[in-house]
Image (cartoon, grey):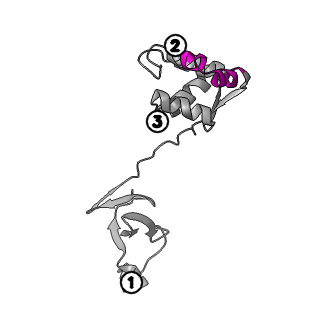
Amino acid sequence: MQIYARVVDSTVAELWPHEPDAPMPNPQPTPIEVFGEEIGSQFVACGPEVQQGWALKGKKFSAPIIVPPTEPVPDRCSKLGLKRALAETGPDAVFPKPEWPAVKEAIASDADLQEDWDLAVSIVRTDPLVQAMVAARKYDDATVDKILVRANALAA
């Protein structure tokens, strides 16, 4: 029995017949004969290995590439976690050289920033003073993401 894949936007939306072992008239009708031209023309003959969700490129079907879900990036970290992430060296470090000495110096050089650091319970990405420090150190969003992930891993 021939199996057909209904392909919509290069992706297998459904298979027909839905039950390959169900009795079919002989000869088996084509999808166009069963569903009409508009829908039937979306069906392509395929092998039994093809499943819903597979892709069709040219005349070749392929299984979808499964991308594992990523953990969401935290929007905050503890001061200890931030210090550890910025001071860390080694293969898991965010930076090739420790950034903590420069950040610590920047905090100490501004009385308001030092007071905020002293009073803060956690470091929140969207805080204006954090954003000012990010801009001063020229960290891009991807780097801030890495810092927050690493800081939370180091001081959970």
Q: Residue pushed farthest left?
A: 58
Q: CA distance from mark 2 to mark 3?
A: 21 Å
> Do residues under tags 1 and 3 come within 8 Å of each other at their CB atoms?
no
Viewer-proximal residue, 2 or 25?
Answer: 2
Q: Residue at x 37, y 59 (%)?
A: 55
Q: Mark 2, mark 3: which one is toward the viewer?
A: 2
Q: CA distance from mark 1 to mark 3?
A: 47 Å
Q: Vertical placement of 94 versus 126: above or below?
A: above
Asked whether the viewer can see residue 155, the reply is no
- Badge count: 3
Q: Vertical placement of 53 versus 45: above or below?
A: above
Q: Residue at x 69, y 22 (%)?
A: 115
Q: For the residue marked with disc 3, what is the amino acid?
A: Ala
Give the percent coordinates (x, y) of residue 111: 65, 21
Q: CA distance from mark 2 to mark 1?
A: 68 Å
User: Which numbered disc flags the more N-terminal residue, 2 or 1?
Assistant: 1
Q: Residue at x 63, y 36 (%)?
A: 127
> Do residues under tags 2 and 1 come within 8 Å of each other at their CB atoms?
no
Q: Is residue 116 magenta?
A: yes
Give the percent coordinates (x, y) of residue 22: 49, 71
Which mark, residue 101?
A: 2
Predominant SS along the magenta part: helix
Which mark, residue 83?
A: none
Stretch in magenta: 104-118
Residue carrying label 1: 38
Q: Residues within 10 Å of mark 2 (few under 14, many from 20)?
A: few
User: Which numbered disc flags the more N-terminal residue, 2 or 3?
Assistant: 2
